[in-house]
Image: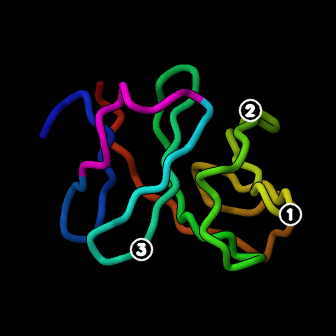
Amino acid sequence: MNENSIRLRLEDGWFEVCERARLIPGRGVAALLPDGRQAAVFTDRTGRAYAIDNRDPFTGAYVMSRGLLGSARGRAFVASPLLKQRFDLETGRCLDDEDVSVQTYLTDHSG
């Protein structure tokens, strides 16, 4: 695999999403995974990659990749573009409703 790519750890190994240079810091992209699921993939200004489930658990819409990045108490989050709930990009936990979370994906931080 290309060391300048964004890769997600899936159950059966690493999945290459795209070259790191194709992502704009602070903006997300949706990636179709081999099993049909979707991941929302982001890089921050330092180049760190994050990936969470692209499905908004509050609406069921596949829109998390269009959310806005921010930080709260030193933790990176994405705010859903629909109802604005914020999700921690490392844990997937909703910062506005502790009973809700989304799946996160381990990313390859090389590059």
For this view, does 23 lie left or right of residue 70? left
**In the rendering, at what x and y percent does residue 73 appear?**
81, 36
> Does residue 20 belong to the magenta stretch?
yes
**In the rendering, at what x and y percent does residue 84 appear?**
85, 56
The residue where tag 3 is placed is: 37
Who's the residue at 68% across and 39% down the image?
76
For this view, does 59 lie left or right of residue 84? left
Picture quadrant where residue 81 is located? bottom right
Who's the residue at 75% across and 36% down the image?
70
Looking at the rendered image, the disc whose residue lies closer to the viewer, 1 or 2, is 1
Dot 3 falls on a residue whose secondary structure is: loop
The residue where tag 1 is placed is: 83
For this view, does 100 lie left or right of residue 85? left
Q: Is residue 64 above or below residue 72?
A: below
> Does residue 96 belong to the magenta stretch?
no
For this view, does 30 lie left or right of residue 59? left
As drawn, the label of residue 74 is: 2
Number of numbered tags placed on the structure image: 3
Marks 2 and 3 sit apart, C-alpha to C-alpha, by 29 Å
What span is in magenta? 16-25
